[in-house]
Image (cartoon, coloured by chain):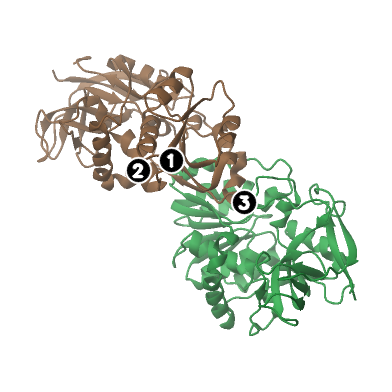
Chain colours: A green, B brown
Amino acid sequence: MNEYRYWRLNSRPLGHDYSSALSLESGDLPSVGDGQVLVRADYLSMDAGVRVWMSAREDSYSPPIPLGTPMQGQFLGPVMESRAAAFKPGDMVRGFGHWATHSLVDPVQSGLTLLDPSVRDIRDHFGPLGLNGWTAYCGLIDVLGLKGGETVLVSAAAGATGSIACQIARNMGCRVVAIAGSDEKCAWLTGTLGADIAINYKKQKVGDELAKIKGGIDVYFENVGGELLDAVFPNMAHYGRIGICGLIAGYTSSHGLPGPARFDQILMKRLTVKGIFLPDFLARGVNYYAPLKKWYDENKLAGDFDEIRGMNHVLLAFERLMRGQNQGKVLVDVRGSSY
Amino acid sequence: MNEYRYWRLNSRPLGHDYSSALSLESGDLPSVGDGQVLVRADYLSMDAGVRVWMSAREDSYSPPIPLGTPMQGQFLGPVMESRAAAFKPGDMVRGFGHWATHSLVDPVQSGLTLLDPSVRDIRDHFGPLGLNGWTAYCGLIDVLGLKGGETVLVSAAAGATGSIACQIARNMGCRVVAIAGSDEKCAWLTGTLGADIAINYKKQKVGDELAKIKGGIDVYFENVGGELLDAVFPNMAHYGRIGICGLIAGYTSSHGLPGPARFDQILMKRLTVKGIFLPDFLARGVNYYAPLKKWYDENKLAGDFDEIRGMNHVLLAFERLMRGQNQGKVLVDVRGSSY
């Protein structure tokens, strides 16, 4: 089997029209060069951040993905062939490569990581124990300095990162306020994940609900941006901290969204607003994995999956994510799909 | 002379129409109660922050000034009568009281401070050595962690606080970029205050000028807000810090300004944005005064004054400040004016 399949980025997508911008291609598997590793994907991770690199924006944390090349993203699966000392065929690994059945990678550049075999569901290496979990931990602990007893607000709380942020905050003894887009998600957040309050932003006025919270919001873990920020800013506690992990509301707009009109609250309440970007902290990964794994083993950290099967459904999975229709981690099971 | 004069706030001003909202009143001097101090003002300080408390906004760092009461602000002058142990008649003091010829104050609540007699111009207790200087020092050093060699951008750079911020940054060995609203101010900033680059925002496109600065802006000391932020955000360096000291562009608007559309740069560049509010740090005042005074004595810290004479011209002075027509500290000399 020397053929593989991949999604190629042909143009910069407009809004959620991904099928006009990407196409499913096939090609011959490349040969493995010195120091390289060829990995077969069992699962592909769908991550909102890549939407930014799909566009032509030069002001992002990563450069635009060149047109005509494979779409970039995380994979998880077995090593097929290795010419790097640290990996051998059959090793289960995670890394950053392509939306493809196979990725040929440089282990360092791709962040290729050998997976802990004691994890009971291998897919959890993408959610609670993967970069979503690491991002939530890094953001809350290292960037925002979360302390037990604080009131924490999480947006896109039913998403892959938000759902872990809620559980970390709960595990640390914080009061957790979660914002999500359906009653089902809200019930999952309060029922299973232990959030104290869940707000359905499609039914409730977020600002009014937040105004009822005595003492205000100490820490806001922001994944959304846009109008939501204007509901949150006036309800922050004095000296509160806001971590901008994602601004998904603006990713599909070519001109961005209006800025938060209540930006003045940064001065009036002496807030701190910071960006959260895991790659800056990857060297601290062990410090994130260990406490997450401990909670995971104690059944205090649960993922949920929004899983779709088949390489041909990658764009559908990605669109579900970008439209916020998912509950938990969006991934694509590509096992046996076309190779 | 038992009469004094004061400006009374009668209604919430609209825009810059201060004369419809305030009136000059006279009354009998109150008697000095236990623990109180009566101070005669030689000078009144005009500060943009009080514009916020003039309005009915409940979300500011201070509550609205009650209608029908004297307008609040800083004074400087001799103690006339004291029933507090730390002060005696003739002491030259600075404190927070009223836009009035006399203020009767509680020394603690008003932050009454005995003035260092070694300062060569007593008015400098309002500018470089006063709360403007302290705010600039606190903001750059304690809030923003300024280090020598960084590139520092200051808006409203010819103002009382901005002009000190420029000089502190220069004294620390930073590259200083100053934004002001006239060629005269720009010449003062580069000629006298040692800024490396001055941008006249009324003539030049700030974003274009900032884009020429190699390496981007490490630290932005923001006094203005509004459109300026959108010119600055994309030109910040990665991991840059922004201190919001003032948002004067929005103070006269009853509905605030649009938020910064390039808010996403906080995430993309992993910026830190914080409020700067001196009263939170007043206990550290000695740590601000000592280095400022050292530079002052070495002629490395100069103030400039935009001075008007007479109690009846207070509103004119305030409007000059709010319209950004001043160069340096705006103050009113009220000596001998009506008492």
Residue nearer the viewer, B289 or B38:
B289
Find out whether the residues at labels 1 and 3 contact each other: C-beta distance under 8 Å: no
Q: Position of residue A165 (x, y in %)?
A: 57, 66
Question: Could you give the CA–CA distance between mark 1 and mark 3, rounded to whole angstroms?
Answer: 23 Å
Q: Quadrant of residue A78?
A: bottom right
**Above-or-below relation of B22 to A152:** above
Q: Which residue is mark 3?
A: A205
* Location of mark 2 (residue): B138
Quadrant (top left/top right/bottom left/bottom right) for the N terminus of chain A: bottom right
Question: What chain letter is assigned to the residue under label 3?
Answer: A
Contact? badges 2 and 3 (CB < 8 Å): no
Q: Which residue is nearer to you in this view: A147 or A194?
A: A147
Question: Residue A89: x and y, percent?
Answer: 75, 81
Q: Quadrant of residue B26?
A: top left
Disc 1: host chain: B
CA distance separating discs 2 and 3: 38 Å
Q: Is residue A312 left or right of residue A218?
A: right
Between disc 1 and disc 3, the foreground one is: 1
Instruction: Determine crowd level at label 1: few under 14, some 14-19, many 20+ residues with C-alpha closer than 10 A.
Output: some
Q: Nearer the viewer, residue A220 or A275?
A: A275
Q: Residue at x 57, y 32 (%)?
A: B227
Mark 3: give few (<14), some (14-19) or many (20+) Cα within 10 Å.
few
Q: Secondary structure at mark 3?
A: loop
Tag 2, which secondary structure? helix
Q: Quadrant of residue A59?
A: top right
The foreground one among B202 and A78 is A78
Tell me: A145 left or right of A280: left
Say which quadrant the C terminus of chain A sits in. Answer: bottom right
Mark 1 lies on residue: B60
Helix, strand or loop at disc 1? loop
- Identify residue type, mark 3: Lys
